[in-house]
Amino acid sequence: DQQGRVLQLVEKPKVPPSNLALVGIYLFSSTVHNAIANIHPSARGELEITDAIQYLIDQPKQVEARQLQGWWLDTGKKDDLLEANRIILDTRLEASLEGEVDDKSQVIGRVQIGKRSEIVNCTIRGPVTIGSDCHLENCFIGPYSSVADQVTLIDADLEHSVILQGAKVVGIQQRIVDSVIGQRAQLKVAPQRPKALRFMIGDDSQIELV
């Protein structure tokens, strides 16, 4: 309403009643625990946060909303996550080299390298952020790439991509672009013949071979 109070939540309506959406940022008092105790699992078998909020509204408890000013993206989608990564690197990244960079490596532009990370014979062209405890060797890391902690990249080229914690990419001949690689994922080339593609792929994954 005009005072910013929430009157009703509608989960993914076919015909949206307004141009507003939940962005997924919530601040609750302890009353939310009672709300959760009084709702039932949804059709997908989960307790939904929107049901808990609606329970509070119906009590009635005071539930208020604030409109987010600025950009917002649904980072549950790959392309939106990459776009959010691009915006953050463009607007928030500050150059900081806390890891070890050898003499054969080049670091160009705004690049952030975390503690105890090792950069060996690599070219890194910012904006790029690399986390802590990473090992990069014989790599090209192009603009708008984010590499989380404890990642290993050897003989790999990367651009406009996000690599999550603990992932390992070794010996991939083609440049990896526009990609999101999950936690502890491993991409490598098998040394023995015959050459073939072998995958173990999780639910809702997307793989594009070119």
Image (cartoon, rainbow, N blue to C red):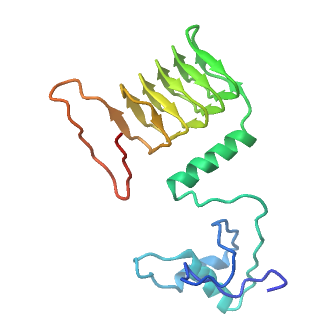
Viewer-closest of 168 and 17:
17
Residue at 66% over, 27% down? 111
Q: Count the numbered circles shown.
A: 0
**Up/down of 120 relative to 51, above or below:** above
Viewer-closest of 22 and 106:
106
**Up/down of 150 relative to 183, above or below:** above
Q: Residue 210 at what x, y percent from top left? A: 36, 39
* Residue 130 appears anywhere in the view: yes
Q: Residue 79 at what x, y percent from top left? A: 54, 52
Position of the N terminus, as image quadrant, is bottom right
Q: Residue furthest left?
A: 194
Q: Residue 69 at what x, y percent from top left? A: 79, 63
Residue at 50% over, 42% down? 178
Residue at 40% over, 77% down? 44
Q: On the picture, is 204 further left or further right than 59? A: left
Q: Residue furthest front?
A: 210
Q: Residue furthest right?
A: 3
* Residue 34 appears anywhere in the view: no
Q: Residue furthest top?
A: 103
**Up/down of 75 relative to 113, above or below:** below
Residue at 40% over, 33% down? 168
Viewer-closest of 204 and 38:
204
Q: On the picture, is 191 further left or further right than 176? A: left
Q: On the picture, is 210 further left or further right than 59? A: left
Q: Residue 22 at what x, y percent from top left? A: 65, 72
